[in-house]
Image (cartoon, rainbow, N blue to C red):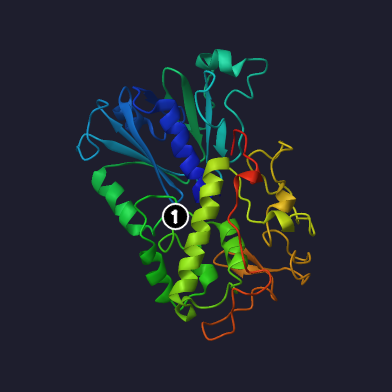
């Protein structure tokens, strides 16, 4: 499932490819046909990401205010199997595909030159929504949710979700308060989108390692400063992810230590994996998918367990904090973190 930074990149791709343009909207699959007919010929006035949710605002004209009742919002949650794929003129969108399975539009068209002949591309029967503008198109397949919202429903979604570290209007105090009032483990809370929107399984594992925090410690046992530190670290990590399409949490001096990862059958794929200039995935994480391998910092075997419906990964030695009364010090030799810098390498198109 795409993490929040990916959905923000998706919103940027829509702004770049369709923002302020009148578009054609269709539903080749038929499951969004009535809604598509209503939106067809309108202008995309906004593409907005909040956590793992994408909201595309459509209006009769480009100067329609977002508060106008005439504005409708397509709400999309990709889930595990959803994806948007793009095709168009050179420079049309910032990514050819976002989500799973990351197959580009037209890959089944044989020798067709997608960039030159994108207008001739016939949508697959599984395409829920096709949006086509003057410079390109985008196809949606396999989403968990694809529905039409009005302004009230959009506002209700924004109110329900926790603060998103990538949004300018985010209020980190909401995150801090919800964590410190909960008896649930911090590893559970970081996966709860009503507590913090956009963090997924990779960010959960890596942020907790960087904080030296045991995933099972109850939120109510944590100090405000510690929870604020998690927010600040996630904000920096996710901002890097939004800019590059890659999750990289390791510091440069740690990347060549035990540079291994326990791959699944499909592998932990990231944007730009084929680019030798970026940090390879086996060097990108401290604990995520490194179960049974030595910790990069202390050589203790990294562990894994089921938590909140997903597998959590942690180092039992480095992450030993279980309460605010436990001994914890930022002077731990491996506890001083620099933020990911531009030297990490930039991603290429595709997420």
**Please, is residue 254 above or below residue 68 in the view?**
below
Question: Which of 328/159 is in front?
Answer: 328
Residue at the limit of the structure toward the bottom, as seen here: 325
Q: Please report the residue visible at 48 percent of the width from the left and 61 percent of the height from the top.
A: 232
Quadrant of res 22:
top left
Q: Position of residue 207 (x, y in %)?
A: 57, 63
**Please, is residue 317 above or below residue 242 in the view?**
below
Q: Position of residue 230 (x, y in %)?
A: 51, 65
Quadrant of res 321:
bottom right
The residue where tag 1 is placed is: 165
Task: Please give left or right for residue 59 compared with residue 84 in the image.
Answer: left
Q: Please report the residue visible at 43 percent of the width from the left and 71 percent of the height from the top.
A: 179
Does the image show residue 19? yes
Q: Position of residue 139 (x, y in %)?
A: 49, 30
**Please, is residue 132 above or below residue 300 in the view?**
above
Q: Quadrant of the C terminus?
A: top right
Q: Please report the residue visible at 74 percent of the width from the left and 55 percent of the height from the top.
A: 255
């Amino acid at each position: 499932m795409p993490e929040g930074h990916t959905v923000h990149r998706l919103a940027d791709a829509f702004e770049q490819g369709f923002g302020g343009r009148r578009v054609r909207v269709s539903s080749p699959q038929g499951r969004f046909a009535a809604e598509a007919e209503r939106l067809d010929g309108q202008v995309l006035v906004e593409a907005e990401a909040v956590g793992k949710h994408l909201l595309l605002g459509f209006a009769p004209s480009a100067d329609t205010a977002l508060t106008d009742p005439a504005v409708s919002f397509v709400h999309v949650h990709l889930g595990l199997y959803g994806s948007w794929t793009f095709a168009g003129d050179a420079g049309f969108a910032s990514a050819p595909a976002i989500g799973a399975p990351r197959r580009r539009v037209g890959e089944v068209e044989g020798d067709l030159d997608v960039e030159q002949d994108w207008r001739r591309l016939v949508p697959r029967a599984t395409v829920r929504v096709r949006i086509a503008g003057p410079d390109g198109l985008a196809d949606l397949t396999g989403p968990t949710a694809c529905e039409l919202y009005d302004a009230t429903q959009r506002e209700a979604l924004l109110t329900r979700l926790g603060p998103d570290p990538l949004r300018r209007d985010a209020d980190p105090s909401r995150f801090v308060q919800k964590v410190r009032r909960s008896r649930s483990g911090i590893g559970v809370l970081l996966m709860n989108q009503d507590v913090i929107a956009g963090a997924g399984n990779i960010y959960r594992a890596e942020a907790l390692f960087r904080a030296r925090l045991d995933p099972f410690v109850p939120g109510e046992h944590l100090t405000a400063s510690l929870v604020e530190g998690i927010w600040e670290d996630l904000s920096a990590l996710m901002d890097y992810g939004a800019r590059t399409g890659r999750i990289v949490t390791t510091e440069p001096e740690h990347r060549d230590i035990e540079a291994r990862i326990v791959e699944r059958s499909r592998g932990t794929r990231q944007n730009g994996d084929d680019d030798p200039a970026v940090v390879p995935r086996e060097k990108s994480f401290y604990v995520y998918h490194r179960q049974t391998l030595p910790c990069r910092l202390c050589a203790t075997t990294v562990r894994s367990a089921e938590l909140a419906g997903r597998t959590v990964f942690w180092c039992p030695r480095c992450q030993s904090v279980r309460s605010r009364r436990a001994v914890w010090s930022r002077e731990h030799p491996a506890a001083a973190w620099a933020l990911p810098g531009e030297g990490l390498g930039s991603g290429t198109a595709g997420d």
